[in-house]
């Protein structure tokens, strides 16, 4: 594990990655069920988009999905960088934070574009 992180911080990261994994598991199942239902119902991409616009419950669900990913993925990438590449300096933590910020921005921007009519314009 990273020499730049305390044992307490490493334990907290482990905890948050496990909690985010539980949230992601539920989100993935709901997402896949939604896809199967849409395909079986014969909906086109345009029809799905029309149904999502203005649907704030849909937006809250996908914002939760994005935020759980924003917690989970950078922690995992930090561990991969440490274990596979030996990147154990403070810069791996900074890189993980920057990636988390990019992931959150891109994901929440996509949710906004799908939910708010004309949001993609």
Image (cartoon, rainbow, N blue to C red):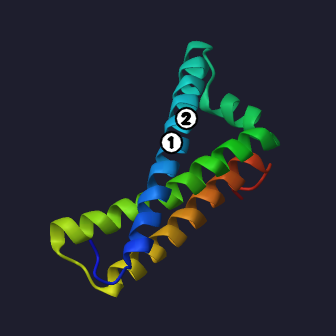
The local crowd at label 2, few if under 14, some if 14 to 19, many if 20 or more residues have their Cα within 10 Å, is few
Number of numbered callouts drawn: 2
Residue at left 73%, top 46%?
60
The local crowd at label 1, few if under 14, some if 14 to 19, many if 20 or more residues have their Cα within 10 Å, is few
* Residue holding disc 2: 26
Residue 120 left/right relative to 68: right
Q: Which mark is residue 82?
A: none
Q: Pinpoint residue 30: horizontal percent, then vertical percent.
A: 58, 30
Quarter holding the C terminus is bottom right
- The residue nearer to you, when weighing 34 against 18, is 18
Q: Is residue 74 visible?
A: no
Please identify, in this view, whether the residue under mark 1 or under mark 2 is nearer the observer: 1
Q: Is residue 15 above or below residue 46?
A: below
Q: Pinpoint residue 107: horizontal percent, then vertical percent.
A: 58, 57
- The residue nearer to you, when weighing 86 against 66, is 86
* Residue holding disc 1: 22
Q: Is residue 94 visible?
A: yes
Residue at left 62%, top 54%?
110
- The quarter holding residue 14 reads bottom left
């Amino acid at each position: 594990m990273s020499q730049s992180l305390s044992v307490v911080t490493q334990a907290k990261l482990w905890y948050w990655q496990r909690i985010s994994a539980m949230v992601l598991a539920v989100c993935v199942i709901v997402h896949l069920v939604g896809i199967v239902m849409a395909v079986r119902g014969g909906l086109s991409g345009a029809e799905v988009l029309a149904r999502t616009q203005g649907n704030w419950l849909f937006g809250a669900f996908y914002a939760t999905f994005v935020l759980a990913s924003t917690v989970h993925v950078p922690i995992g990438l930090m561990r991969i960088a440490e274990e596979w590449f030996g990147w154990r300096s403070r810069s791996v933590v900074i890189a993980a934070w920057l990636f988390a910020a990019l992931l959150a921005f891109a994901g929440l921007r996509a949710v906004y574009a799908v939910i708010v009519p004309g949001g993609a314009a």
